[in-house]
Image (spheres, grey):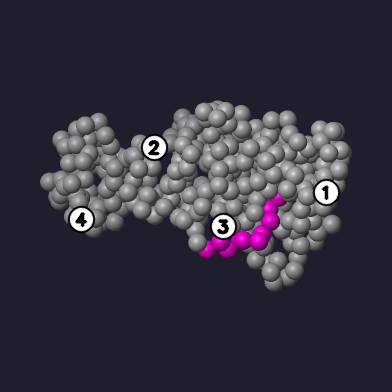
Amino acid sequence: MTDRPLEGVRVLDLTRLLPGAYATLTLADLGAEVVKVEDPRGGDHARQMPPIAADGTGVYFTILNRNKRSVALNLRAPESAAIVAALAARSDVVIDSFRPRTASRLGVDPGTLMRANPRLVCASITGFGRTGPYADKAAHDINYEALAGLLTLGGARPHVPGLLIGDIGAALNAAAGILAALFRRERTGRGGVVDVSIHEAALGWMLFPSARWLVAGGDADPRQLPLRGEAARYNVFETADGRWLALGALEEKFWSAFCDRIGRPDLASLPEQPGDAQAAALESVRQVMRTRTRDEWLGQFSDIDVCLTPVYTRAEALADPHANARGVVARQSGTTYITPPGVTVVPAPSLGADTDDVLESAGIGRAARAHLRGLSVIA
C-alpha cells in the first residue's frame, strides 16, 4: 500500500489472541505504529497456540502480528501502571481485550487512561461489552455464535463453522470504531471510548438470515434469497474428477445462460421457491455436472459470465493468479501472508524485541529499565 493514511498514529495494543490482534493488524497495514504489550512470561498466548511453525512460534501469532513492535511488560506488577501511563500519554489509541473488572484492576480501563490523556481513543474488545448482565462472563467464539443463533442456520441440528465468526467481526468493528473516533477527534480535539462486543458482532452476521423476522416478525419467506444450499442456481456441484464448482446464478440472465450451456434450457423457468420441483432440478444439475471434469466445465463457460467458479483448496486459493496479480499474497522467509495490496511485510517481532527502544522514547531511561528488569516487570 503506497498510501499510508495512518502514518504517525501510535497504537498501544494490550490485547491477546485473535480479535485485538486482527484489529491492530488492520491499523498497522494502514500505516499506524502498533506497540504490542506482552507478558514477559511467554508473551501472547497465541505464541504457543498450535499449529507451531518450524521456529517454535504459533502460526496464528506469526500471521496476525506482522508490522508490529513488541514490549515485554507484566501488567500485573504494581510498577507497570506508571509505564502504561507513560506509553498511553504518547499514544493516539489504546486497545485492550480484558473483561471490564480486570481492566479496572490493572488500571487500563478508559476512565483511568483518559484522565491523563483526554485526546486518547480507548477501544475495548470484550465478549459482551462493558455493560449488561453478561459483561464479566467468560466465553469463546462458539458461545457467541450460539447466543447469536448462528449455529442453527444449517437446520435444527447445530453446526460448528470452521471460522471464528464473532472474533473476526469484532476485530473489524473495532477497527472501524477506532477510525471513526480518530476522525471525530480531528474535529473536536477529544478522544473517545469504543466499546466492542464479540457477541454483538456475531449478532450482526444475522442481518440477512433474520431479515424476514426482523422486518415483519414472520417465518422464512419461500421467496427469500436461496442461500442455504436448497436451490440449483446457488449451490456447489461435484465434477467427474471429484473436484467442485460453485454456482451463484441468482439473476435470471445468469441462470438462463447456465441452463442453456449445460444443455438443460428447460430448467431456466424453474420456480425459485423450495419444493419438489426445485429438489428435482438440483439433482438434475448435479448429474449433468458429474459428466465432465472441473477444468472441462470451466473451459465450457470461459466465454460467458454465469457466476461459476472453482471451489479452491487453500493452496489453490493462495496460488490464484488474480490474488497474486493484485499483490494480496506476500511470501517472506517461508511464510505466506494475506495482505491488502501493496503492504510491505515486516515479520512478527520476537517477544520484547522493542522493549528498550519503546520505553526509552517514553522517557524511561536505562537505569530505570535495569531496575524494572531486576523486578521482572519488563524483559
Q: Closer to the camera: disc 1 or disc 4? A: 1
Mark 2 and mark 1 in contact (Cβ < 8 Å)?
Answer: no
Q: Closer to the camera: disc 1 or disc 2? A: 1
Query: How far across and down, in percent of the image, does residue 287 sit?
Result: 19, 35
Find disc 4 in the rendering and name its residue. Answer: 304
Is residue 352 something one can see in this rendering?
yes
Seen in the picture, residue 302 relative to 312 is either above or below; the reply is below
The mark nearer the N terminus, 3 or 1, is 3
Mark 3 and mark 4 in contact (Cβ < 8 Å)?
Answer: no
Q: Residue at x 63, y 37 (%)?
A: 350
Mark 3 residue crowding within 10 angstroms, few (<14) / some (14–19) / many (20+): some
Residue 364, disc? 1
Query: How far across and down, in percent of the image, does residue 98 sit?
Result: 72, 41
The mark nearer the N terminus, 4 or 2, is 4
Highlighted magenta segment, given as a residue range: 3-12
> Does 11 lie within the magenta span?
yes
Q: Quadrant of residue 176?
A: bottom right
Asked which secondary structure carries label 3, the reply is loop
Amino acid of disc 2: Arg
Mark 2 residue crowding within 10 angstroms, few (<14) / some (14–19) / many (20+): few
Find disc 3 in the rendering and name its residue. Answer: 30
